[in-house]
Every structure is written in C-alpha cells, then in structure tokens.
C-alpha cells in the first residue's frame, strides 16, 4: 500500500509545494451548465470551492513553480486564464477523487502516517532520529502547521492509493504488445530533397511599397514595450551568511555540545559466500540450496584460510565473488534489507566465520575481516563544517532581525533607497532594461515585484516599492531610475529586415508550389531528375540529422508499393520531398524491452481509465464553475494589486512579510 512512498523520496517536497496529482485535464468547458454558483469559484456536488481556497491554491502553485525555477519563469506563464483553469481543474479532480476514495473505504492509518513522516531525513536530527523541533520548524518555514501538513499528506497518500488501483488492474493483451513492438521497431530507408526558399529569392519581385504597407497594417509587430531601469536592494540569508563571522568560542562550544554528531560509528569489513534462493521457489529448491551451503561450510571448517578462493569459485553473488566475497566496510543500519546478515556480522570476532545465515535472498556464510572502531573527529577536522552551520544560524537570526526594519524603512522613507541601504549595509544595484512581464536579473523576475515596479505609485510618483519576498529568504526593494514609455520602431530602422522577410515568405510560397508539383509527378510514376540525399536507415525512435516532421511523414506513408513519396512543409519556409525506398521489419524485442513497452502502454491505458472515471464522477456530482470569475484577472489576481499611499496599512498593522 505504501510502496510508492519508499520509491518516491520527493513525496514530502511535492506535498509542501502543493503540486496536484498528474491526472489528465479533461476539459473545463464541460463544467458549464448554466447554473449559478454564487460567490464560489466552483461547486462539486454539495461542496463549494471558495474564492479563498482557489486563490490560495493558485498562489501556492505559482510560488512553488517560481521556487523550482529559481525565479526564471516568465510571470505571464503563471497568471493567465489557462493557468487558472488548470489550477481549478486540479482542485475539482482532487475533491471528486477524495469523496470517491472515502466512500470506497480507502484510508491511511495514523501509525503509518507517523511512521512515514518519522522516516523522512529532513525531519531527523544528527543521530537519525525524528526531531519534533525540526519538524515544526521546517513546516513553519513553509507556512504550514503540522495539522495542515498531515492532512494534506494523508489526502495525497489516499489519492495515490486510489489511483494505483487503476494502474495495477490495467490489462494489455499480448497481441497488442506484439503489434506495437513490430510498429515501434520497424526501420525505413529514406532520402530527402529540400527546396529552400533562398533558391527562389531571385524569382520574387516585390512592389516598391510592400514593406510600408505591411508596416502600416501590422503596427503591433513593431511596438517597443514600456521599459524601465531600476535601482534595487537585496536582503538575503545567503548574503548575510557570507558576511557572518562565527566566534571561535562558539565554534568550540558547538563542538563540545554536539560531539556525537562528529563521531564515525563502528563499521566492520565483511566477506561472504552467497547461495541464492528464488523467493518463488518451492521447498525442494530451498532444500537443495541449504545442502549446497552446508557443504561449503564444512569445506571452510577444514580450510578457513581458503575462504577467498572458495568464494571466487562457489559464491553466487557476482558483485563480490571476484573479490573473494569482500563486501567492504558495513556500518550499523546499512543492511536493512537483510537484517539477519547484519545481526550475525556484529556477533563475530575478527577472522571468525559464521555458520550459514538465512535471509530473504538466500544463504550467507560470513567472515569478519576487520573492525573499524567508533572514532571522534577532532575540532580542527570539523571546524569548517561547524563554522558553516553557525554562519547559517547567524544569518537566519540576522535576517529575521532586519527583515521588518528593511521593509519599514523602504516603505516609510520611500523617496530614496539610501536609508534602507544604510540599515542593511549594502550598496544598491542598477538593473538592465525591464519590461512588465520579464526582467533579465533573476532576483527581479518575480511577478509581485514587477507589478509593484510598474504601479503608478512607483513608476509615476517615484516611490520605493515595498520589500518583496521574491524567493524564500530573499527580500528586494526597488525604485525606478529611468523610464521609457511604449513606442513604435521607426519604419526606416526596420525597412531592410522587413523587405527581406516579405521576400522570403513569397519565395517560400514558390518553394511549396514547386515541391507540390514535383510530388505530383513522382506519385504518378513520372521520371523526375532530383538530387536526393544519400539513403538513411531510420526508425521512429532512432534518426540522425533528419527533422522530426520528415520522420513522422515517412512513417505515415503506405509502403505496399515502393518507392513511396511524401512532402513536408517546414516552418522555415522550405519544402522537403521524402522518398522511402525500403522497409525492414522489426526483429523480436528482448523480453526486458517488450516488458518496458507493455508497462508504458499500461500507464497510458490507466491514465485514460482514470480520465474516464473522473468524467463520470464529474457528471454524477454535477460540477459547475464560475467562468466569469476565472477569466477576470482583476477579480482573481494572484497577488494584491498595488494600492495608493493613503490606502496602504501602517507598518504596525501590516504584519509579517
């Protein structure tokens, strides 16, 4: 039930980032039934998705994507109708599946949830034990309480268990796999001939005013967007960490307090002779394996010094047999899959050989080669590590001390960044040109900051922005130092490039016309002089120096009569003729490849089944959404629009950043 947790170590990060389950988007248009949903964004049966719930989900999704992309995502991609529809669809699917899962009795026991959380390394202390303090601190940094996190984690596990039922029950007929194998492995011999637009440029004669007519008819293409340069200050934990200088006395104190953290635990060098037993084997196979290992053990009792030679000849572990059975040093807790092995190893004395030890994998005869006792690293060995940790702590505390003051000073003394710069002891930086949707500097490419920079208060009234958290642990305040309004490029500056572009388009049309004419003659069986490229053998998955559209068209061709011909119109204004002269049918795929193909097909079918199930749930529940709310950006701004100075709250009432 919980296998997916151990296989997907990023579960915790996924839950914290609020990434919705990746089910197929099945079309919000079908939600519109004409029924009103009041002030809610949507209604799923009797459950209303409120504006607050939707806005929070959208904001968390946007912030998570910005964190993962380190602020390099174009804000326009995060705030548009498509993004809002996708977010709402995720909420609707989640509600439908949760209701269905709960009705089916799919639950997550408290003990399992507790065990899962306790095993996450991010919540463990230096000794590998669950730390409640770290757990609460980490969740606090993510803006979550333990109750919120556990509820979301419980829901995600419930949903995944429910979805896994579809994946595990999907059946793919052998005949389908075999047919797909043949199709995917087929290879074709093909040649190309490209008619490029450049070859037809001499045939193009443009009207004298063609460029001017196009320029006048398409003014939007030649707009230079409004842009600004800003002066900005950055307060970040990272910068403060570079400035922090730990006190040598604190370094020593940390070392003394956390000595166990710097211990190298006892480890033991082991060698083994292994006799495997298939878990699916019957009693006879197990008995034969037991007899073999007993025979080897009797041989070792007579000649223990020959352990390495016997291991090379008789051990069934290919990874260690060639090295005389040597497994290297093994620490406590590193053999969790075969605890019987570790338990026997730590009972041996150096040079001693164990009796056969049974595990789920088979039988082991173990020799303890050497013992490396627990050792403590000296202060000088770990000084750099401790100083780095203390710098983090000092920077975190200093950031917390400065953050509110930095915001207040930037806001209250908004005629200049100098007071804020003096407070944090940093020099302002000057950006390159910035437009409303994008900034070249990653620290400035944040939708909230860009919205603030282009607000009337900052742009027209020459005020500072507030300190805005662009990524966790980084605040930026900015002010405009240069502004250029939207303008149109002069015709003369674009004339030459525009004339060439228009001519190329006309030449491209001529290339297409000629290509279609040649294709018609080829398909009629006429003899046409064409300088075909050298033949290449390609498959759907393996092709070199061949454009993908050409490959797709080549494998669509009916090859019952060869050679077969096709034509491809390229976005680069070229036309490519394709000739298929031969077909090589696929050889039988290796079992592992066939299994891989069947697994991929099962996933596709499972997703289709889940999408169909969701559609049925949606119809039964009667889902309706408020289309107007989603499409009105001002009604659903992911970040509050800037307000006038008189409307802004006082520093004491703004609360945290």
Image (spheres, rainbow, N blue to C red):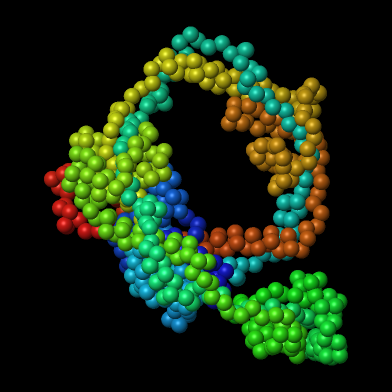
Say which residue appears at 72% left-offset and 42% top-offset: 543
The quarter in which the C terminus is drawn is: bottom left
Q: Is residue 648 above or below residue 513?
A: below
Residue at 75% from the left image edge and 42% from the top image edge: 538
Total labels drawn: 0
Quadrant containing the N terminus in the rendered view: bottom right
* Residue 99 position in % (x across, y down): 41, 71
Image x and y of residue 263, in percent: 53, 75
**24 shown above or below 496:** below
Residue situated furthest top in the rendering: 208
User: At which x and y percent is residue 240?
Assistant: 36, 54
Q: Quadrant of residue 342?
A: bottom right
**Res. 496 visible in picture:** yes
Residue 58 in sight: no
Pick the front one: 448 or 546: 448
Q: Is residue 452 left or right of residue 31?
A: left
Which picture quadrant has residue 544?
top right
Determine the residue positioned at 36% across, 43% down: 444
Which of the 4 image quarters holds residue 490? top left
Q: Residue at x 33, y 70 (%)?
A: 145
């Amino acid at each position: 039930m919980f296998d997916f947790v151990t296989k997907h170590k990023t579960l915790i990060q996924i839950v914290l980032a609020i990434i919705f389950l990746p089910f197929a988007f099945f079309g919000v248009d079908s939600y519109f039934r004409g029924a009103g949903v009041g002030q809610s964004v949507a209604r799923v049966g009797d459950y209303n998705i409120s504006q607050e719930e939707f806005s929070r989900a959208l904001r968390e999704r946007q912030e998570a994507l910005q964190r993962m992309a380190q602020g390099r995502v174009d804000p326009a991609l995060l705030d548009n109708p498509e993004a809002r529809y996708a977010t709402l669809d995720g909420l609707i699917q989640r509600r439908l599946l949760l209701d269905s899962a709960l009705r089916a009795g799919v639950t997550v026991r408290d003990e399992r949830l507790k065990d899962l959380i306790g095993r996450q390394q991010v919540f463990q202390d230096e000794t590998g034990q669950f730390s409640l303090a770290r757990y609460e601190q980490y969740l606090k940094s993510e803006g979550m309480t333990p109750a919120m996190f556990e509820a979301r984690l419980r829901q995600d596990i419930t949903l995944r268990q429910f979805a896994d039922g579809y994946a595990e029950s999907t059946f793919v007929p052998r005949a389908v796999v075999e047919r797909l194998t043949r199709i995917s492995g087929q290879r074709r011999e093909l040649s190309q001939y490209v008619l490029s637009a450049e070859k037809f440029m001499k045939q193009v004669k443009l009207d004298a005013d063609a460029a001017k007519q196009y320029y006048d008819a398409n003014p939007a293409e030649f707009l230079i967007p409004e842009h600004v340069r800003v002066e900005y200050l950055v307060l970040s934990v990272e910068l403060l960490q570079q400035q922090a200088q730990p006190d040598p006395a604190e370094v020593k104190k940390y070392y003394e307090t956390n000595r166990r953290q710097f211990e190298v635990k006892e480890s033991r060098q082991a060698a083994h002779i292994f006799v495997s037993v298939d878990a699916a084997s019957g009693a006879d196979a197990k008995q034969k394996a037991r007899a073999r290992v007993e025979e080897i053990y009797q041989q070792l009792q007579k000649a223990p010094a020959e352990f390495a030679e016997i291991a090379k000849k008789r051990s069934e572990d290919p990874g260690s047999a060639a090295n005389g059975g040597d497994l290297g040093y093994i620490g406590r807790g590193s053999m969790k899959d075969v605890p019987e092995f570790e338990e026997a190893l730590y009972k041996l004395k150096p040079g001693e050989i164990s009796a056969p030890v049974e595990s789920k994998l088979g039988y082991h005869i173990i020799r303890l080669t050497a013992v490396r006792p627990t050792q403590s690293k000296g202060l000088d060995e770990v000084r750099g590590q401790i100083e780095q940790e203390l710098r983090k702590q000092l920077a975190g505390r200093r950031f917390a001390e400065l953050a509110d003051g930095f915001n207040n000073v930037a806001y209250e003394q908004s005629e200049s960044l100098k007071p804020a710069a003096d407070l944090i002891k940093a020099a302002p930086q000057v950006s390159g040109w910035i437009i409303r949707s994008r900034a070249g500097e990653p620290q400035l490419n944040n939708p909230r900051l860009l919205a603030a920079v282009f607000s009337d208060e900052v742009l027209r009234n020459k005020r500072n922005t507030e300190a805005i958290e662009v990524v966790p642990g980084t605040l930026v305040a900015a002010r405009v130092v240069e502004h250029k309004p939207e303008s149109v490029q002069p015709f003369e500056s674009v004339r030459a490039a525009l004339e060439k572009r228009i001519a190329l388009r006309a030449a491209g049309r001529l290339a297409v016309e000629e290509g279609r004419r040649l294709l018609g003659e080829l398909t009629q069986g006429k003899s046409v002089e064409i300088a075909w490229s050298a033949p290449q053998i390609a498959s759907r998955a393996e092709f070199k120096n061949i454009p993908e559209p050409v490959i797709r068209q080549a494998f669509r061709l009916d090859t019952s009569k060869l050679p077969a011909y096709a034509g491809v119109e390229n976005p680069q204004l070229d036309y490519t003729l394709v000739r298929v002269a031969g077909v090589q049918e696929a050889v039988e795929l290796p079992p592992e490849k066939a299994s891989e193909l069947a697994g991929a097909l099962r996933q596709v079918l499972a997703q289709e089944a889940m999408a169909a199930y969701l559609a049925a749930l949606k119809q039964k529940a009667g889902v309706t959404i408020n289309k107007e709310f989603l499409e009105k950006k001002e009604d659903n701004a992911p970040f509050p629009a800037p307000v006038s100075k008189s409307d802004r709250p006082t520093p004491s009432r703004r609360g945290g950043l």
